[in-house]
Image (spheres, rainbow, N blue to C red):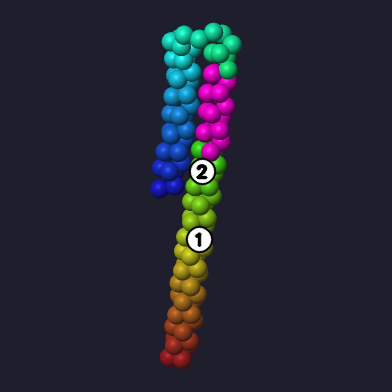
Amino acid sequence: MSDDNNNATMTMLLSFLAGAAVGVGTALLFAPKTGEEMRGKIKDLADDAVEKIKEYATEAQDKIRASYEDGKEVVLEKKSIITSAIEAGKEAMEREKEKQKAV
């Protein structure tokens, strides 16, 4: 499940980057502006894209950390259950050994 979330986040980020690149290219080709205006517009678009990428990266990191912590808790819980089961098995085996010695 965590891998699916990571893949979805990466896909979303790459899609955003591709969309930003297409948008900048389209703006260059079709905007009737002077070179200076165009450069300013492209700089603004690039700055906006960088900010969005930073936001998405932060969100992705937060989701990855949360998934990691959730997974870590599950592993510790399962480890505890397994340890308890092993201890119970050892105790049962000792009781059976004692019964066999008594017979």
Instruction: Tell me what residue is drawn at x 48 percent, y 51 percent.
Output: 67
Residue at point 54%, 50% (across, down): 65
Q: Is residue 26 visible?
A: yes
Q: From the image, tell me which residue sits under label 1.
A: 73
| Secondary structure type for disc 2 | helix
In this view, 71 is above or below 21: below
Q: In x, y percent, where is residue 14?
A: 46, 29
Report the label total: 2
Three-letter code, disc 1: Glu
Q: Point out residue 19 in the picture as x, y percentages from the top left corner.
A: 44, 24
Is tag 2's residue or tag 1's residue first in the polypeptide sequence?
Answer: 2
Furthest residue to the bottom? 102
> Which SS class for mark 1?
helix
Give the residues in magenta. Answer: 41-55
Residue on which the image places disc 2? 59
Most frequent secondary structure within the magenta stretch? helix
